Amino acid sequence: MPVSSLTCPHCGSDRLRRSAPRGLGERFLRALSPAHFYRCRACGRRGWHLGRVGRAHRQRRSDAVPGRPMEKRDVEARRRKATRAAVAVAAAVGLGLVTGLVVQTCAGRAPSVLPGR
């Protein structure tokens, strides 16, 4: 079905945009079927369709409209995302080091043969 013929069943508008699956049920449906979720820009209702929702074809980079300049909020969001990633990596490395030290220390104290065996 061409994208242009897809309309909202509630209000009849053709102003639809793709929408991410919400909840485990929708993610499961999306993973096992060709269902794509959409939201109507006119009435706000969500729905799903068996097939793609959105542009019929991608524009080539040379034909695309130049992007808007990065706003302050975009720059801050990227910085926060990078900071969270760095903190997560540092925490994982630190936890790994602590776990390794604890295991190594406990291995030195543990008896070589378990009693009762």
Image (cartoon, helix red, strand yellow):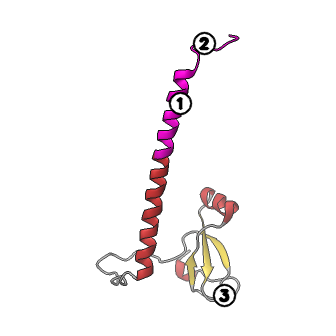
**Where residue 24 sits in the image (x, y, percent)?**
68, 60
Among numbered discs 3 and 2, the one appearing first in the sequence = 3
Whether 48 is among the magenta residues is: no
According to the image, label 2 marks what residue? 113
Task: Label 1, secondary structure: give it.
Answer: helix
**The C terminus - image quarter:** top right
Most distant residue in the left direction: 62
Pointer 3: what residue?
Answer: 43
Look at the numbered discs 1 and 3 and tell me whether their residues touch, using CB distance below 8 Å.
no
Mark 1 crowd level (few <14, some 14–19, many ≥20, 10 Å Cα): few
First to last magenta residue range = 94-117
Q: What residue is drawn where x is 53% and y is 30%?
A: 103
> Is 101 located above or below residue 41 in the figure?
above
Q: Residues within 10 Å of mark 3 (few under 14, many from 20)?
A: some
State whether the magenta stretch is mostly helix, strand or loop: helix
Q: Which residue corresponds to the image point at 46% horizontal and 73% vertical from the top-left?
A: 77
**Residue that label 1 marks:** 103
**Residue at mark 1 to residue at mark 3: CA–CA distance:** 59 Å
Identify which residue, 98 or 28, lies in the foreground: 98
Measure the C-alpha gap from mark 3 to mark 2: 71 Å
Residue 86, placed above or below residue 99: below
Residue pictured at 60% horizontal, 12% vertical = 113
In which quadrant of the rendered image does the N terminus lie?
bottom right
Counting residues from the N terminus, which is met first, the one under dot 1 or under dot 2?
A: 1
Residue 100: percent from left, percent from top: 49, 34
| Amino acid identity at mark 1 | Val
